[in-house]
Amino acid sequence: MKSCLKAVNNFQEFCFFLQRKATDQLMLAATDISNPGYSVLFALLLFIGASVWLGTLAQKAMEKKEFLKGFFLGNRGLGAWALALTATVQSGGTFMGFPAFVYSHGWIVLLWIGSYMVVPLLSFAVVGKRLAQLSRMTDSFTVPDLLRERFADPRVGLVSSIMIITFMSFTMFAQFKAGATIMKHAWPGSGVLALSEDYEPTAAEKAESKNGSAGAAAKSASKPIDRKYYVGLVVFTVTVVGYTLIGGFLASVWTDLFQSVMMVIGVTILVCLAVPMAGGLEQATKTAIANTSPDIAFGPGYSTIGREFLTPGLALSMFFIWIFGGFVSPASMVRVMAAESTEVMRKSICLLSCYNCLIYIPLVMTCIAARTMLPHLDKPDEVIPRMSMLVTEGLPFGPFISGLILAAPFGAIMASVSCFILVISSGLVQDIYVRFLHPTATETQVRRATNVSMVSVGLIAVIANLDPPQYLQALVVLSASGGGAAFTIPILMACYWRRTTAAGMLAGMLVGFCFYFGLSAAGWIQNWAAAAPEGSALAQSVINFLGPDPKIGVPGLFRPYYIFGIDPMVWSLVVSAIAGVCTSLVTKPPSEEHVSRFFDVAVAK
Amino acid sequence: MPDIQELPLLKSAKREAMVALGIWLAATIYSLGYCFKYGYGRDPESLTYVLGFPDWVFWGLVMPWGACTVVASVFAFCFMKDEELPQSGQ
């Protein structure tokens, strides 16, 4: 009896000990929330492992087929899920920059992204079927190749090829930096958790690095780029280039699919935990209003710096930008070309529509709720990492779940980088090497050229990111929307208008892009003048000519110039259409025989 | 003598592209119109909530978002036509 009592007593003590230990740990987790420990690193390794595994699977799937088409187009066998979830989800930016916007500006960001309600429909229904048909008729697997055959003019192929390679390179370089930065922060003990695509040092860090006299030690400690960054950069590059090299197009699509599914799971967990914690959605909005200002529930959005985030003009622009920047982006066109059948496209419309509903609206809800739990974050970029750790804290496997949520943007970055590498190297190999340099290359030579081009793209990306210059960001913004400005109208013309000439195509592409570039450059000059010290005569004359900073849109050094408050992209579309159509009309019509090949069919009477 | 006709895929693709662009135009006009009218320059006191969303967000964005998802699915399964894609190289 006595021993029994003692045992019970011991057991109670043991239970108490366990409880105290758990509380201690909880306290630790609560005080040390900026340090994710090993769970994130573990989740990242899981993502890397899964990607490499998918890469080897993909390699098996494309064996015994013609190398180029298998490697760069997966033998045109994409199914509905693969097509839907990978053709338009553009980059990790959607899941990193976007939540920060919601946290900073409030409900209006749902209007900013609002056109995603029709993106799935437009991405497959406007040019999808026709592109798939044309790419098969011309037997091409890159967009420049398709255009070159369609107009029987190498110049169209060359110009579009150079434009695509340039645009995609800049977009891709920024993604490398983001990937390396995430790897760096995932390292246990790194402290900060800024899942930002372009890492911005904090104000304190900036101030410190300005005071160079504070001594070398302080300087090196405050320098945002350090050894962990380089390790991250190398690990990231080797992984992505590695599995893309092994598995080609299919590897890229499958990893993209994998991360898309992880992403939707993560977002669902987040919203289901965060909104009840904030006391329901209505209460969350009310608390957000109390913590900030009523502006957070209305347009043009809450702002602490007196800049209107989304004026009606910019809201209108966004309904053009997401649509027309999306379905003509080279990455998404290539995937449509790889679709197995038109049935796959129909299913994809439905799947992607549902997917977008499940991603964007819940993300907005989560970040509104974040204003209750984390009312005043210094760095809005941290909203998703912090929320995911906060809401999973008490759960079984909490750290692991938050690790997965945190790793999902990393997966998104890997997937988009591998897609960009493919498009760029397919351009280098097919459109430049095979078409211009070595038309009689054997399969072994082509394969070697592919390997060389991919590895060099990776190497160049590493070198460019060792110490990225600040203006790189401008080139990134420029190439992301510039592609839409350059290709939307020409692609529509190539698909549907018989009278389109090669000269019209060139005019549409070049004028669209140059106009966009001109307006962006005007914005940079305006920004420079606005920041210049008072009394500078040149800056004053620039301000007189271009007008003062309109105080709208996203702040930043590389804000474009808005005519009537509308984004340059919209104007470029208009100008590109005028240039393309007029040039086509004044140049010699294409031969009827050639056009008929792509537009007509002979039917026996 | 064979008759020359427009490719059947081209015909249906053109029609579908026009309808899709029409849906985009309708969604844009409705959403932007509603949000401009009720989401900008409102008296904060007059804000009501529908299912927890601010009223203008629900009627101007969430509701049309749902509607577009339904419309897109109907479009995909009832309107869009399947066509034979040519074999590569033909």
Image (cartoon, coloured by chain):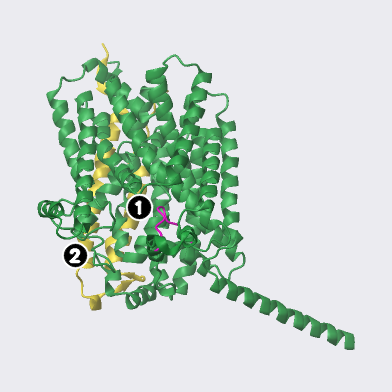
The picture places residue A531, in percent across and down from the top left corner, at: 22, 58
Direction from residue A400 to residue A586 in the image, left or right: left
- The residue at which mark 1 appears reads as B70
The picture places residue A199, in percent across and down from the top left corner, at: 41, 55
The picture places residue A448, in percent across and down from the top left corner, at: 52, 24
Q: In the image, is residue A198 part of the stretch drawn in magenta?
A: yes
Query: Which chain is depicted yellow?
Result: B
Reading the chain from its start, which is encountered first: label 2 or label 1?
2
Residue at image x 67%, y 76%? A21
Q: Work out whether A238 lies above or below B40.
A: above
Callout 1 secondary element:
helix
Q: Which residues are magenta?
A: A193-202
Q: Nearer the viewer, residue A126 or A332?
A: A332
Three-letter residue code for mark 1: Val
- The residue at which mark 2 appears reads as B37
Chain A drawn colour: green
Q: Nearer the viewer, residue A554 or A522?
A: A522
The prevailing secondary structure element of the residues shown in magenta is: loop
Q: Chain of mark 1?
A: B
Three-letter residue code for mark 2: Lys
Callout 2 secondary element:
helix
Residue at image x 54%, y 53%? A228
Q: Does the image show residue A343?
A: yes
Choose mark 2 or mark 1, whichever is in front.
2
Quick one: quadrant of the N terminus of chain A? bottom right
- Where, by quadrant of the figure, is residue B78 drawn? top left
Q: Nearer the viewer, residue A95 or B67?
A: A95
Q: CA distance from mark 2 to mark 1?
A: 25 Å
